[in-house]
Amino acid sequence: MRARLLGCELRLRRQDLGLTISGLAGKAGLSPSFLSEIEQGKKLPSLVSLDRIAGALGIPRNSLIPPPGAGLDAPDLPARIRRARERMDLTQEQLAAMASLSAGMISQIEAGAARPSLETVDRLARALSVTPCHLLVEGPDPETLLANLTPETRRMLLDPDVQAVLQAAAGLDGKGFRAVMEVIRESRRGMPAQDQPPPGGRC
């Protein structure tokens, strides 16, 4: 399972940078076939190889390593599935139909009464327009996210128009969400100075 999660995270990071497997392999000094097997969860890289991959991606090694609580038995998995469903304004019955599962199974998973298989998580992720990593790996808490934001970004997120767009985009996957954020950021740059939030605004 940890190999599959690491491979999933690696693939997302690579795709976010617009790199092919061959391109990343060349930068990391590894073979494309070896990198492909890592992304498919068939192999776990050594620490040396992981350092090379992380260096080629420009991220810390730990960014690619799944946290201890990640996986099908993660206690927060049912809540993450429920939140992703609610963001898309789907009922359990609608999600079940989209994922080719029974409504009873969805109910049991969200209640924590049944542990989904990896195949079931893949189906749910596709139906919810997110990646399996999004459901299986716990993200940073909101306080940590806010602490890492620049003052400009925090002010932007407090703008009511920006919040309306973000609410509409909540069902997007990570790449789509970042694209929306970039559009918002560019549009804010083009605003007249008097329309922009004051530089000293509080969060």
Image (tube, grey):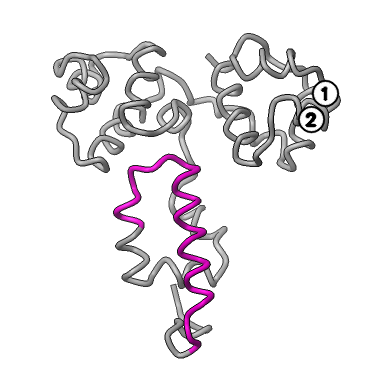
Horizontal side, residue 24 vs residue 92: left or right: right
Q: Secondary structure at mark 2?
A: helix
134 above or below 172? above
Horizontal side, residue 143 vs residue 56: left or right: left
Q: Position of residue 3 (x, y in %)?
A: 60, 16
Q: Look at mark 2 in the image and give the residue it sits on.
A: 51
96 above or below 167? above
Q: Position of residue 192 (x, y in %)?
A: 48, 86
Q: Nearer the viewer, residue 53 or 194?
A: 194
Horizontal side, residue 19 vs residue 25: left or right: left
Q: Position of residue 15 (x, y in %)?
A: 61, 35
Are circles 1 and 2 on residues that touch, CB within 8 Å? yes
What is the distance, in whole Å, between disc 1 and disc 2 at their CAs?
5 Å
Residue 128 image-quadrant placement: top left
44 above or below 124? above
Q: Which residues are magenta?
A: 166-193
